Image: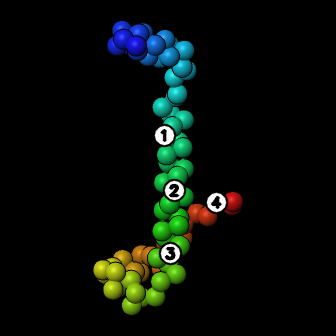
Amino acid sequence: MSTLALASADAAIAAVEPKVKPALFQRLLEAREGQALRRIHAFLAAQGDQRLQDLGYTAADIEAIRQSRPVWLSR
């Protein structure tokens, strides 16, 4: 198969494929990031103060972890 045939096949596929809206993709990424942040916060909140200090968190960081109230979405 020649490279000319491959180039024309790629052009035909590009012409047929619908364009994905960037806003939809961005919303999907934001949703996954929010999910990851909630899981990380739950993990950190479940750790003891000493463990968090061992991980390198300062007293102010630990206080912020303890006081934050993330919004939990129902599954």
Pointer 1 and pointer 4: residues touching (CB < 8 Å)? no
**Direction bottom: furthest residue:** 50
- Choose the circle earlier in sequence order: 1 or 4: 1
Q: Are marks 4 and 2 in contact (CB under 8 Å)?
A: yes
Mark 2 nearby-residue class (10 Å; few <14, some 14–19, many ≥20): some
Give the residue number, with chain letter if any, for mark 3: 43
User: Where residue 8 appears, x then y in whole percent?
Assistant: 42, 9
Pointer 1 local density, CA inside 10 Å: few below 14, some 14–19, many at least 20: few
Q: CA distance from mark 1 to mark 3?
A: 26 Å
User: Label 3 to label 2, Cα distance in Å?
Assistant: 14 Å
Residue 34 numbered mark, or none? 2
The answer to whether residue 15 is above or below residue 62 is: above
What is the spatial separation of the Cα atoms under label 4 and label 2, in whole angstroms? 10 Å
Q: Position of residue 42 (x, y in %)?
A: 53, 73
Q: Which residue is mark 4?
A: 73
Q: Position of residue 67 (x, y in %)?
A: 48, 77
Depth check: give the residue in front, 69 or 73.
73
Residue at image location 34% in from the left, 85% down from the top: 53
Q: Nearer the viewer, mark 3 or mark 4?
A: 3
User: Which of marks 3 and 1 precedes in the sequence?
Assistant: 1
What residue is at 54 percent from the left and 15 percent from the top?
A: 16
Q: CA distance from mark 3 to mark 4?
A: 16 Å
Q: Secondary structure at mark 1?
A: helix
